[in-house]
C-alpha cells in the first residue's frame, strides 16, 4: 500500500463515510480541512479549542501549530496513522500537504462499578471498565510506583485494538517480558472483541482445559499480581485484565483472603480447596461406591441407600448423568436470563424439578443431595474459567467411575494429575509450589500464612 | 514419541477392562447375619442367611411395624459354599457378605464338625471380613434370628450390639471375631466363643462356649456368672461393677463401679514345676451404698471395702481357674501365652502341666472416689 500521503485521496475516502465530518475553513484563500468523527469526539472541545483559534489565526504571520497553545499538535506522516488517529478520536487538521492531529477523544464508557463476577466482602470496590486509559488510571490509583511500566501494542489487522502490557520494573523476569511480547506480536487476528479472546490467542496449550492466563476485573488484584512479578495485559474495550503467568494456586486466591486475619482466612481457603475437590469428585465417588464397592459404605448407610434406590428405574450412573446435566443446564439458563428472571429459574429448577423427580421415583433423594452439594461446592470457585475446567473434568470422572469404580476414578485422577504437572504457563509450572516443591512458598498456597513474611514472587 | 505410547496405554486401561464387577446396590442382597446349624434328619449342614429387605424398613412417613424388614432363607447342603450358591434359587438378589455383622452357630454344629473346617470358607473367601464376630448358642438358631428387636431392625445386628456393651457389664463376653478364631486355631489353642440365648423371645448375651484345641470341637459351656472371672483373666475388664453383699462388708451391701483393671502374669519355676502369679489391680469408685452408718468422711472408711472387693474378685477368678483345671482340664483362657513368653521350655508339654499347675491370685482393689453426695454423715 502506498504509505505516502495523498491529501486528495484521503479527503475523497473520508467523504464516503457519513459519520466523518469534514469542515472546510476558507481562511483568506488558505483552506484548512478539519476532519473528525463526531460520535467519538468532544464536539464542544473542537469548537472551543480548534475552530475558534483557527478563526483568529493568521496564516501569514505564524505557522499553524502556533495557533494552538493548549493542545499539543502531532504531525502525521503515514496513511495508516491518519486512519488510526481518526479512529482514536483525534481531530485532523489538513493544511495544504501537512496533516496534524489533536486529541479530542471522548468515547462512550460506562462509569466505574463493582465487578459483578468477582465479589468480595472487604477491599476496594472499583472495577475495570472498557476504557484502556481509565483502566490504567485505576491501576495507578492502587499502584503508585515509578517502576510501573507500560508497553503499547496494536493488535488486530482490522480492529487495531490497543493492547497495553504492564509490569513492575526490576521485579519482573526479563524472559517473561520477552515471551509475552513475542506472543502478542504473533497474533494475526482480525478483531479482538475482549480479553477472553486475547487470552486464548496468547495461550500455548490449546487442548488443555485449564486457563493458562488469569483474568480479573479488580485493580487491586492486578496491582498485587504486578508486585509479585507477573505481567498484566490490558485490552482496549475489555474490562477483564489478563494476568500471566498463572498457577492453579493463584486461581484459588481471593482478595478477601488477605483482608482478613490469617487463621480464619486460611481455613476458608482450605475449605475452598476441599469444595473444589468435592465438586469434581463427589458424584463419581458416590457412583463408584454404590455400583461397585458396597462393602466400603457403613452398613446403616448402605441399607438406607438401598432403600432409596429401590424402585428407581435407571442405573445410578445414568441418574447422576441426568442430574449433572440438569444442573449445568440450569446454570447456563441462569446466566443467560435477564436478572429479574434468573432466580426464578433456579427456584423452579432446584425445588420443583428436584422434589418432583424424587417424588415421582425417577431419581433417588440421595443422588439429589450429592449432585446439588457438588454444585454448591463448585460455586466457591471464583475463577469462572477454572470452574468450567473442573466441571468438565467432573463429567470425565463420572464416566470413569461408572466404567471401573474406584479403580477407574484413580486412573482418571492420574491422568488429570499428569496433565496438570506437565502444564506450564509462560514457563512457570502450573502446580507450583506443590510440584516443583517449594515449601517456602506454601505460606501462600493451601493456607495463607501471616503477612510480612508471606509474599514473594514467581521466578 | 513417548506421548504417542503413553496415551494409548492409558486409554487401554479403561477400554480393555470394561465395566466388570458393576452391581448396583439395590440389586445386591445385603446380608447382615448368618446362622449355622446341623440338619439332624438329613445329616447335613444348615445355613440361614438374613437378607435385608430395604423396602420394608420403616421411614418417617410410613410407620408400619407389620412386617419385619428382613428375610431369613434357610437351606441345607453338604457344604456352605453350595448352600450360598443355592440361595440364588430362592432369592432374586444374590447374597453379598461385605456387611455381615454376626455369625451365629449352634453348639450342635461344633459338636458334630471340627471348628477349623466350619470356618474354612469364611477365612478363605475374600468377601467375608475377618472382623465379623462369631457367637454360639444352645437355643434354636432359626428362632433367635427371627426375633424382633425393639431398637434395631435386625436380630443379627442386635446380637453384635449386645457384645459391644462389654465395658458396662463383665458378664457380657467380649467380641470374638472370625480373625481371632482363625488365629487361635492356627496357634492350636482352646478358646471361648461368646454365647447367646433366647430369653422369652428376646436375645440375651449369656456365657460362652468352649472349643477344645485338639478335637477342635465344642466341649462345654461357661455360665454367665463365671464370665466375670474369665474377663479378669483375659485382661479385658474396662468397666462393669462389683457387688459386695452383707457377708462381705459391714454396714450393708455396696456396689463399686469399676473404672479400670489391669491383669499381669508372672511365671517362675519352682523346682521343676512352673508357677504362675496373676496380679489384678482394679480401680473403682463407690457407685451405690445400701448400708447405713458408713461415713465416707472418716479416714480409712474404704479399707474394709477394698479388702472385701479383693476377696470377691479372687473368689471369681479362682473359680474359673478351678473350672479350667479340674472340670475341663484344658486351658481355654490363653494362659499358655505367658508360659510361652516367660518359660518357653515348659510350653511344649503345656497340656500335661496345666491341670496341676499352681496359680496364685493377687488382687489390689483401690477406691478412688465416693461420688457427689453422701447421706451417712452426722
Image (cartoon, coloured by chain):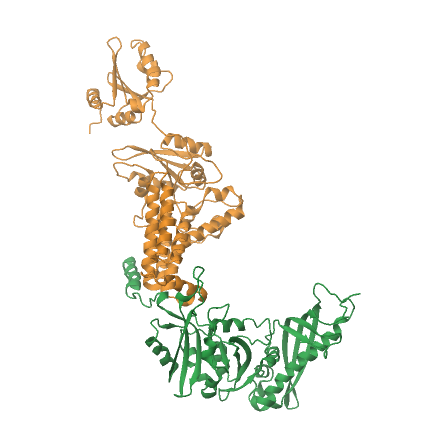
Chain colours: A orange, B green
Where B272 sits versus A242, above or below? below
Image quadrant of residue B6?
A: bottom left
- Looking at the rendering, in which quadrant would you find the C terminus of chain B? bottom right
The percent coordinates of residue A196 (x first, y second) are 33, 40
Asked whether A406 or A417 is in front, the reply is A406
Q: Position of residue A73 (x, y in %)?
A: 33, 20
Can residue A92 be spotted in the picture?
Answer: yes
Tell me: residue A398, above or below residue A176. below
Lateral position of residue B196 relative to residue B366, left or right: left
Image height of B279 relative to A123, above or below: below
Q: Quadrant of residue B125?
A: bottom left
Residue B180, image x and y in percent?
50, 77
Q: Is residue B174 left or right of residue A393?
A: right
Position in image of residue B338 (x %, y %): 59, 81
- Please name whichever residue, A193 or B84, is drawn nearer the observer in this view of the structure: B84
In the picture provided, is B89 more to the left or to the right than B128?
A: left
Residue A425 visible somewhere in the drawing: no
At horizontal 71% and vertical 67% (from top left) the residue drawn is B370
Q: Name the quarter where the N terminus of chain B is drawn.
A: bottom left
Amino acid at each position: 500500500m502506498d504509505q505516502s500521503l495523498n491529501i486528495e485521496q484521503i479527503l475523497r475516502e473520508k467523504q464516503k463515510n457519513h459519520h466523518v465530518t469534514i469542515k472546510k475553513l476558507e481562511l483568506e484563500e488558505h483552506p484548512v480541512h478539519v476532519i473528525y468523527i463526531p460520535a467519538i469526539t468532544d464536539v464542544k472541545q473542537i469548537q472551543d479549542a480548534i475552530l475558534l483559534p483557527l478563526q483568529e489565526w493568521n496564516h501569514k504571520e505564524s505557522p499553524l501549530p502556533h495557533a494552538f497553545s493548549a493542545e499539543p499538535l502531532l504531525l502525521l506522516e503515514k496513511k495508516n496513522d491518519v486512519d488510526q488517529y481518526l479512529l482514536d478520536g483525534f481531530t485532523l487538521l489538513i493544511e495544504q500537504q501537512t496533516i496534524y492531529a489533536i486529541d479530542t477523544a471522548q468515547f462512550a464508557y460506562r462509569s466505574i462499578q463493582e465487578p459483578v463476577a468477582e465479589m468480595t466482602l472487604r477491599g476496594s470496590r472499583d472495577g475495570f471498565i472498557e476504557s484502556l486509559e481509565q483502566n490504567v488510571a485505576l491501576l495507578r490509583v492502587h499502584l503508585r510506583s515509578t517502576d510501573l511500566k507500560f508497553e503499547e501494542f496494536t493488535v488486530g489487522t482490522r480492529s487495531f485494538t490497543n493492547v497495553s502490557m504492564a509490569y513492575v520494573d526490576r521485579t519482573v523476569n526479563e524472559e517473561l517480558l520477552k515471551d509475552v511480547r513475542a506472543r502478542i506480536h504473533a497474533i494475526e487476528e482480525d478483531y479482538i472483541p475482549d480479553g477472553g479472546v486475547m487470552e486464548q490467542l496468547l495461550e500455548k496449550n490449546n487442548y488443555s482445559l485449564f486457563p493458562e492466563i488469569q483474568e480479573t476485573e479488580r485493580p487491586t488484584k492486578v496491582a498485587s499480581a504486578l508486585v509479585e512479578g507477573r505481567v498484566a495485559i490490558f485490552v482496549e474495550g475489555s474490562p477483564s485484565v489478563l494476568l500471566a503467568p498463572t498457577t492453579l494456586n493463584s486461581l484459588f486466591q481471593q482478595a478477601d483472603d488477605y483482608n482478613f486475619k490469617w487463621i480464619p482466612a486460611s481455613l476458608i481457603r482450605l475449605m475452598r480447596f476441599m469444595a473444589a475437590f468435592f465438586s469434581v469428585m463427589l458424584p463419581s465417588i458416590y457412583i463408584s461406591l454404590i455400583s461397585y464397592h458396597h462393602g466400603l459404605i457403613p452398613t446403616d448407610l448402605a441399607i438406607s441407600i438401598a432403600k432409596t434406590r429401590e424402585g428407581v428405574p435407571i442405573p445410578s450412573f445414568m441418574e447422576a448423568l441426568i442430574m449433572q446435566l440438569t444442573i449445568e443446564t440450569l446454570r447456563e439458563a441462569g446466566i443467560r436470563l435477564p436478572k429479574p428472571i434468573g432466580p426464578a429459574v433456579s427456584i423452579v429448577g432446584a425445588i420443583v424439578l428436584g422434589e418432583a423427580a424424587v417424588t415421582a421415583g425417577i431419581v433417588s433423594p440421595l443422588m439429589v443431595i450429592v449432585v446439588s452439594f457438588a454444585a454448591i461446592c463448585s460455586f466457591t470457585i471464583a475463577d469462572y474459567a477454572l470452574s468450567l475446567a473442573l466441571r468438565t473434568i467432573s463429567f470425565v470422572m463420572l464416566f470413569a467411575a461408572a466404567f471401573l469404580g474406584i479403580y477407574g476414578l484413580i486412573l482418571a485422577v492420574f491422568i488429570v494429575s499428569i496433565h496438570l504437572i506437565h502444564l506450564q504457563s509462560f514457563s512457570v509450572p502450573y502446580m507450583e509450589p506443590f510440584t516443583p516443591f517449594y515449601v517456602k512458598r506454601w505460606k501462600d498456597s493451601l493456607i495463607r500464612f501471616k503477612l510480612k513474611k508471606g509474599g514473594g514472587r514467581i521466578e | 514419541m513417548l506421548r504417542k505410547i503413553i496415551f494409548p496405554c492409558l486409554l487401554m486401561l479403561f477400554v480393555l477392562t470394561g465395566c466388570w464387577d458393576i452391581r448396583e446396590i439395590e440389586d445386591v442382597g445385603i446380608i447382615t447375619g448368618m446362622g449355622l446349624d446341623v440338619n439332624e434328619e438329613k445329616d447335613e449342614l444348615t445355613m440361614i442367611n438374613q437378607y435385608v429387605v430395604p423396602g420394608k424398613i420403616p421411614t418417617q412417613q410410613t410407620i408400619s411395624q407389620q412386617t419385619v424388614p428382613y428375610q431369613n432363607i434357610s437351606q441345607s447342603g453338604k457344604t456352605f459354599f453350595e448352600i450360598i450358591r443355592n440361595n440364588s434359587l430362592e432369592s432374586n438378589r444374590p447374597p453379598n457378605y461385605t456387611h455381615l455383622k454376626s455369625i451365629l452357630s449352634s453348639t450342635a454344629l461344633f459338636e458334630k464338625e471340627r471348628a477349623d473346617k466350619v470356618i474354612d470358607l469364611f477365612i478363605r473367601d475374600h468377601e467375608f471380613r475377618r472382623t465379623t464376630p462369631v457367637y454360639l448358642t444352645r437355643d434354636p438358631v432359626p428362632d433367635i434370628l427371627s426375633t424382633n428387636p425393639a431398637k434395631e431392625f435386625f436380630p443379627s445386628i442386635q446380637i453384635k450390639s449386645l457384645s459391644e456393651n462389654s465395658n458396662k457389664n463383665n458378664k457380657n463376653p467380649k467380641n470374638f471375631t472370625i480373625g481371632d478364631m482363625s488365629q487361635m486355631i492356627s496357634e492350636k489353642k482352646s478358646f471361648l466363643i461368646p454365647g447367646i440365648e433366647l430369653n422369652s423371645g428376646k436375645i440375651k448375651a449369656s456365657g460362652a462356649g468352649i472349643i477344645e484345641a485338639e478335637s477342635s470341637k465344642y466341649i462345654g459351656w461357661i455360665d454367665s456368672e463365671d464370665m466375670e472371672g474369665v474377663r479378669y483373666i483375659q485382661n479385658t475388664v474396662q468397666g462393669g461393677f462389683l457387688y459386695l453383699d452383707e457377708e462381705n462388708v459391714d454396714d450393708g451391701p455396696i456396689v463399686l463401679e469399676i473404672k479400670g483393671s489391669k491383669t499381669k502374669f508372672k511365671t517362675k519355676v519352682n523346682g521343676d514345676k512352673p508357677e504362675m502369679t496373676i496380679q489384678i489391680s482394679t480401680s473403682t469408685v463407690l457407685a451405690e451404698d445400701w448400708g447405713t452408718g458408713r461415713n465416707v468422711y472418716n479416714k480409712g472408711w474404704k479399707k474394709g471395702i477394698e479388702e472385701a472387693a479383693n476377696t470377691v474378685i479372687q473368689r471369681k477368678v479362682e473359680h474359673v481357674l478351678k473350672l479350667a483345671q479340674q472340670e475341663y482340664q484344658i486351658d481355654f483362657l490363653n494362659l499358655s501365652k505367658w508360659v510361652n513368653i516367660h518359660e518357653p521350655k515348659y510350653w511344649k508339654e503345656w497340656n500335661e502341666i496345666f491341670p496341676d499347675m499352681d496359680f496364685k491370685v493377687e488382687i489390689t482393689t483401690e477406691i478412688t472416689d465416693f461420688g457427689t453426695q453422701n447421706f451417712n454423715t452426722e
